[in-house]
Image (cartoon, rainbow, N blue to C red):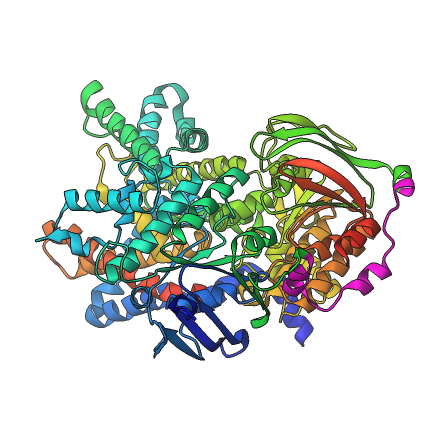
């Protein structure tokens, strides 16, 4: 009997530890609380099929913007380049479509990998704080996109209509966006939990000196962390591309930048690194989505919407980080 | 009896227990007179720091009495109250704020009496800072930044700040009225020899107006500069010497500090290499003319298979820097390091050396362990080759089953007491934490293992367990290099002991000779 239980936990240590973590992680209670609150308040609209679909969509977008950077946050650095990759990658797809045809969408992961890799190299070589570095990269890429669209080509969007087929639902009620996102989610969980990369990134975030003394090539794995983050963001951007109807945004929206970080922190990967991972970020993304959709249902003035998002996030992060203290030190 | 003979500060029968189990202090009494330097010596974990923290109000004692100028008063409840009783502390490290100017640092937290309507009276601060530094004979530019000063001068500024804090609490910045008692927590640890001498000449000067409690484990310093010595061991006061009335030798003091039950059975159980016999073994590592300016010069030696070499010497002799150089943490200026297979590159980092077969084990669990990780992950961290499969070259996938059974094997072998391999390391006892750290290297089984303070801060029983593991590892073919503060550790682990002083190699002892010299 005991043997059997043990065997199972050997086979699924990730699942069991994730479950154990969730029981203790305050974000689970936040999610349950939010669902209960909105179901009670808006019983018809909250649980309607349309609403559940939009929850799914917002969740996918948020998670695609946050799973990659989670790996970087885990090692105690910050990666904000995801918006830059998403936007400029979209511009690249648009620019390259005449030459590469339908294959041009694959420029996304390649571009993400390149940006992530160069972030890593520059960060390790110059020791520029990753926060500033990647924020600058996002600013440069985002504004370059704007310039390409508005100034150079004089267009309002960089849509590629040939990719419209990506939007819509192949399976009823399941947006294609989700299908495109699933491999990215699986890949991030695999990197984190099944490869030595995940262990090493965790080690660097938790105790960089100790990691170095254990003979880990810290510089190499830092570069790798950024590269994988960029790659996952690039791959995830394909899902985002389908979500927006075969295009990427051409103007920078601060809200997009916020939601990535918010999902990471809400999920329980502290910005100092060392603990957490993409599995937690998924729950963080779900919590963010519920807050977002819930506020939407309240019907508040759209002009005030972002303000309320900010305030709610502040409260949520405070609750989660207080709860996490107990988890970490207990 | 003159009035200066009566104690300024006295504590009696101080006891302190942490978490209701760990007995940190057990009935300790001590006193400080005016204008003297009193030393409190003991090993790590002997209770020195706890006693000092009680004196400055960071920990409350369980029981005890506190007398200030002969009057019984309650123990201070915070550092501010300690200042009222004339006591302040200068910590070993992290006390200095590098990007403040000297006068800003001197008055940090003491600005209260130097503000008017919230505005800092800079002229007055500058004036008083200059006055106090001049009076105490500390010569430095008060407008330079702290980081610009040499380390010994930074320490001095810290000491002046502590004195100033006490004086201000007692009325004014002037010298009259109060004799500050300054606790110096291992002040010489980061200093070079010259800087150390400079610091002490300053202290002897300052003694005219202040008293010092000098916390240290460096015996020669203690003997040279203090009037009286309190020896703590395992939370108890085990010896007291008044150096003005009696003579103590360094060896006696050392025995009192370390004085645990002998590990002698361990060195009777193992055979240590003799020179003629060592010559026949293959050479695993040769270090040639290794130099690093300011730390060590021209160090050369061979390490044989199954041999343990100890780098022995006083703190600051350069021994730990040599060990760190061999593991690639510090880059040498010149010289070569060659293992049996490969020559080390001059810009190598630890991961290069690990691939060359060099491991590094430090007793400081903060450097070795990831406390919030389960035992399993901590052990597999340096054993990825054993637990991960590589379907293609750049992808290594962890096999959890292998990871688990590896950790279980180590736990069984080292008798690590923990509920399971999933237990997070912070919940383990000190000895068990150390065993996890050493266990991962046991499994890795490098050709050469660097040991830096392998048993720092753990109790006697666990120490012996660790020694046995290390000796078994040696027997199984691993060569080692030890750096430690405890001569007994060298006697137990090492075949040869290299004595290093002021960064130079002085003499090589074999185990037996070493024990004779050290009277072990």
Residue appearing at x 30%, y 27% in the figure:
A91
Image position, residue B457 (x, y; %) = 59, 61
* Magenta highlight range: B251-277
The reply, left or right, for residue B129 in relation to residue B36 is: left
- Total of numbered circles in the picture? 0
The answer to which of B432 and B259 lies nearer the viewer is B259
The reply, left or right, for residue B90 in relation to residue B116 is: right
The answer to which of A217 and B57 lies nearer the viewer is B57
Image position, residue B363 (x, y; %) = 62, 55
Image position, residue A125 (x, y; %) = 45, 29
Asked whether residue A191 is in view, the answer is no
The answer to which of B249 and B379 lies nearer the viewer is B249
Quarter assignment of residue B110: bottom left
| Residue B480 covered by magenta stretch | no
Q: Which residue lies furthest to the front in this view?
A: B1
Q: Which residue lies furthest to the bottom in this view?
A: B63
Image position, residue B406 (x, y; %) = 70, 57
| Residue B265 covered by magenta stretch | yes
Asked whether residue B151 is in view, the answer is yes
Please, what is the dominant secondary structure of the magenta stretch? Answer: helix
The answer to which of A215 and B259 lies nearer the viewer is B259
């Amino acid at each position: 009997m005991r043997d059997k239980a043990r065997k199972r936990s050997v086979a699924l240590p990730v699942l069991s530890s994730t479950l154990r973590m969730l029981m203790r992680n305050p974000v689970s209670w936040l999610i349950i609380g939010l669902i209960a609150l909105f179901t009670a308040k808006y019983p018809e609209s909250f649980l309607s099929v349309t609403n559940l679909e939009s929850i799914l969509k917002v969740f996918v977008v948020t998670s695609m913007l946050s799973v990659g950077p989670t790996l970087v946050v885990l090692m105690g650095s910050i990666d904000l380049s995801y918006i830059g990759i998403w936007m400029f990658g979209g511009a690249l797809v648009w620019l390259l479509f005449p030459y590469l045809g339908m294959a041009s969408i694959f420029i996304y992961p390649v571009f993400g990998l390149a940006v992530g890799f160069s972030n890593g190299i520059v960060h390790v070589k110059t020791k520029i704080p990753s926060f500033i570095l990647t924020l600058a990269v996002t600013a440069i890429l985002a504004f370059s996109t704007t310039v390409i669209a508005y100034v150079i080509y004089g267009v309002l969007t960089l849509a590629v209509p040939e990719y419209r087929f990506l939007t819509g639902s192949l399976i009823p009620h399941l947006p294609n966006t989700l299908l495109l996102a699933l491999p990215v989610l699986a890949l991030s969980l695999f990197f984190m939990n099944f490869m030595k990369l995940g262990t090493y990134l965790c080690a660097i975030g938790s105790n960089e000196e100790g990691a170095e003394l254990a003979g880990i090539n810290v510089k190499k794995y830092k570069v790798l962390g950024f590269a994988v983050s960029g790659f996952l963001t690039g791959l995830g951007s394909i899902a985002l591309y389908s979500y927006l109807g075969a295009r990427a945004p051409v103007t920078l929206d601060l809200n997009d930048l916020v939601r990535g970080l918010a999902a990471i922190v809400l999920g329980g990967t502290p910005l100092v690194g060392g603990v957490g991972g993409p599995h937690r970020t998924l729950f963080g993304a779900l919590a963010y989505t519920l807050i977002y959709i819930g506020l939407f249902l309240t019907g508040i003035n759209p002009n005030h919407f972002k303000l309320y998002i900010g305030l709610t996030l502040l409260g949520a992060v405070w609750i989660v980080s207080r709860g996490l203290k107990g988890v970490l030190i207990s | 009896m003159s009035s200066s003979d009566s104690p300024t500060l006295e504590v009696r029968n101080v006891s302190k227990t942490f978490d209701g189990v760990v007995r940190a202090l057990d009935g300790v009494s001590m006193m400080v007179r005016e204008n003297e330097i009193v030393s409190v010596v003991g090993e790590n974990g002997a209770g020195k720091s706890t006693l000092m923290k009680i004196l400055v109000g960071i920990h409350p004692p369980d029981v005890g009495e506190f007398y200030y100028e002969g009057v019984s008063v309650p123990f201070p409840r915070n550092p501010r109250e300690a200042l009222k009783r004339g006591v302040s502390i200068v910590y070993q490290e992290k006390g200095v704020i590098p990007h403040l100017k000297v006068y800003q640092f001197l008055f940090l937290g003491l600005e209260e009496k130097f503000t008017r309507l919230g505005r800092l009276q800079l002229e007055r601060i500058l004036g008083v800072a200059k006055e106090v530094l001049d009076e105490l004979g500390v010569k430095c530019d008060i407008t330079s930044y702290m980081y610009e000063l040499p380390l010994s001068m930074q320490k001095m500024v810290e000491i002046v700040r502590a004195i100033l804090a006490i004086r201000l609490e007692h009325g004014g910045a002037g010298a009259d009225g109060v004799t500050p008692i300054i606790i110096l927590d291992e002040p010489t640890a980061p200093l070079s020899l010259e800087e150390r001498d400079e610091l002490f000449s300053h202290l002897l000067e300052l003694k005219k107006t202040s008293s010092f409690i000098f916390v240290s484990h460096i015996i020669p310093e203690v003997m040279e500069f203090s009037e009286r010595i309190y020896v703590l061991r395992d939370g108890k006061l085990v010896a007291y010497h008044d150096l003005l009335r009696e003579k103590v030798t360094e060896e006696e003091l050392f025995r009192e500090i370390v004085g645990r039950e002998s590990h002698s059975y361990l060195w009777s159980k193992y055979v240590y290499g003799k020179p003629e016999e060592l010559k026949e073994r293959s050479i695993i590592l040769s270090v040639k003319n290794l130099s690093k300016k300011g730390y060590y010069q021209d160090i050369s030696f061979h390490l044989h298979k199954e041999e343990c070499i100890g780098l022995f010497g006083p703190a600051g002799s350069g021994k730990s820097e040599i060990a760190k150089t061999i593991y690639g943490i510090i880059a040498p200026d010149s010289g070569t390091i060659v293992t049996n297979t490969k020559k080390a590159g001059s810009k190598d980092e630890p991961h290069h050396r690990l691939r060359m077969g060099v491991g590094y084990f430090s007793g400081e669990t903060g450097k070795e362990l990831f406390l919030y990780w389960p035992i399993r992950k901590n052990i597999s961290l340096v054993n990825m080759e054993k637990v991960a499969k590589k379907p293609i070259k750049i992808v290594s996938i962890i096999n959890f089953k292998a990871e688990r059974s590896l950790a279980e094997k180590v736990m069984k072998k080292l008798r690590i007491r923990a509920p399971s391999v999933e237990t997070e390391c912070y919940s383990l006892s000190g000895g068990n934490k150390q065993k996890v750290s050493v266990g991962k290297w046991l499994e890795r089984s490098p050709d050469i293992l660097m040991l830096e303070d392998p048993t720092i801060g753990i109790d006697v029983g666990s120490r012996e367990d660790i020694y046995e593991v290390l000796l078994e590892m040696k027997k199984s073919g691993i060569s080692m290099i030890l750096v430690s503060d405890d001569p007994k550790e060298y006697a137990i682990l090492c075949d040869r002991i290299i004595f290093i002083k002021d960064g130079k190699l002085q003499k090589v002892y074999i185990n037996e000779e070493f024990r004779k010299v050290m009277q072990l």
